[in-house]
Each structure stands twice: as structure tokens, then as C-alpha cells.
Image (cartoon, helix red, strand yellow):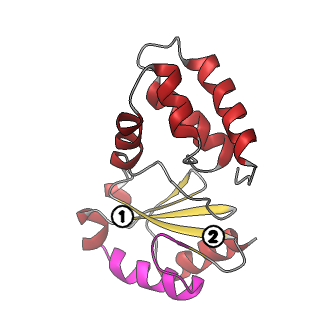
Amino acid sequence: MNVHVAGSDVGERTLAIVGALKDLEGPLLPILHEIQAEFGYVPQESLPVIARELNLSRAEVHGVVTFYHDYRNHPTGRHVLKLCRAEACQSRGGDAIAERIKALLGIDFHQTTMDGAVTLEPVYCLGLCSCAPAAMLDGEVHGRLDADLAKDLVAEARR
């Protein structure tokens, strides 16, 4: 979900998420995942709320958010297209597929199309090495990509 909300609303919604999950063992990662599911990214306004409620420093929370590549600190497009950049995918033509997809979308990695439809992100293994090159669109994996399948994937993401 890619929702733009006012800062106070972010704090209130973050507090509700933290309240629901803070009794878990090791609650920080599940809380961050839920916040990202709610907002489409982890808003900076959420960090002090999480830190206060979990008795952590803001730096500790920030460190976790920036360490894991799956967390975003900015809104994404309606669809997120992840391209595997690991060695197996590269050896099977992943670089050419990535260049084709970037050209079709008119963006580079870590960017979103002007219409807000697609955000393109690199990932460093989708676990589909035997089906390389691979991609993930909105959580659904696609393997054995070629130029035609790349074009179809971009068309699906643009819808």
C-alpha cells in the first residue's frame, strides 16, 4: 500500500502497530514489516515512536531500517518490480534483461516511473538460481526471463 498520510496520523498508526506487536519476542523486525505494509515504506516519523515504545535508541531503529535492503525510506510506485542481480542471474543474461527493463520503463534502479506505476529495485537473490534470470513483481516470482517475458512483465506492471 502506498499511502501518503499526515505526520500525526503516521505516529498514531505506528503506535497502534507497535502496541499490537511489541510483546512478540524480537518485535522490531515484525513491527517494521507491518509499518512498511501499512504505508508502503517506513516513514521517518515512525522511528522515534518505535524507539520510545521498545526502549531502544532512535539510532538502533534507524540502523536496522538502513541495514536491511527490504525496508524503504520513501514511497514506492503502485507496483514494485525487483530484478535479481546475483551471479547466477547475471551469468544467464540478467544484465541484458535489466537493461531492457530499465529502457522499457525509462528509469534506473531505485527509481519510480513518472506516472507512479512502477518502482524498480535490485535484489541480490530470489532463490530461483536454477530458473535464472529471475524477477519478482509485487511478491510473485518469475523465472527464465528473456526479452519477450521482460516486455510482458513490464506491461503487467504498468496496468
**Which residue is found at the position 65% from the left and 65% from the top?**
77
- As helix, strand or loop, the secondary structure at mark 2 comes to strand
The residue indicated by pointer 1 is 132
Q: Nearer the viewer, residue 17 or 91?
A: 17
Vertical order, 20 against 76 (above or below): above
Vertical order, 67 against 124 (above or below): above
| Disc 1: CA contacts within 10 A as few (<14), some (14-19) or many (>=20) | many
**Which residue is found at the position 52% from the left and 30% from the top?**
50
- As for residue 93 lying within the magenta part, the answer is yes
Q: Quadrant of residue 123?
A: bottom left
The x, y position of residue 70, in whole percent, is 44, 49
The CA span between labels 2 and 1 is 22 Å
Looking at the image, tell me whether mark 2 or mark 1 is earlier in sequence order.
Answer: 2
- As for residue 24 lying within the magenta part, the answer is no
Q: Which residues are magenta?
A: 92-111
Q: Main secondary structure of the magenta part?
A: helix
Q: Nearer the viewer, residue 74 or 70?
A: 74
**Which residue is found at the position 74% from the left and 52% from the top?**
3
**Count of picture labels:** 2
Q: Quadrant of residue 122?
A: bottom left
The x, y position of residue 153, in whole percent, is 60, 71
In the image, which disc is placed on residue 17?
none
Vertical order, 34 against 90 (above or below): above
The residue indicated by pointer 2 is 118
Q: Nearer the viewer, residue 133 or 67?
A: 67
The x, y position of residue 89, in whole percent, is 31, 66
* Amino acid of disc 2: Val
The x, y position of residue 16, in whole percent, is 69, 24
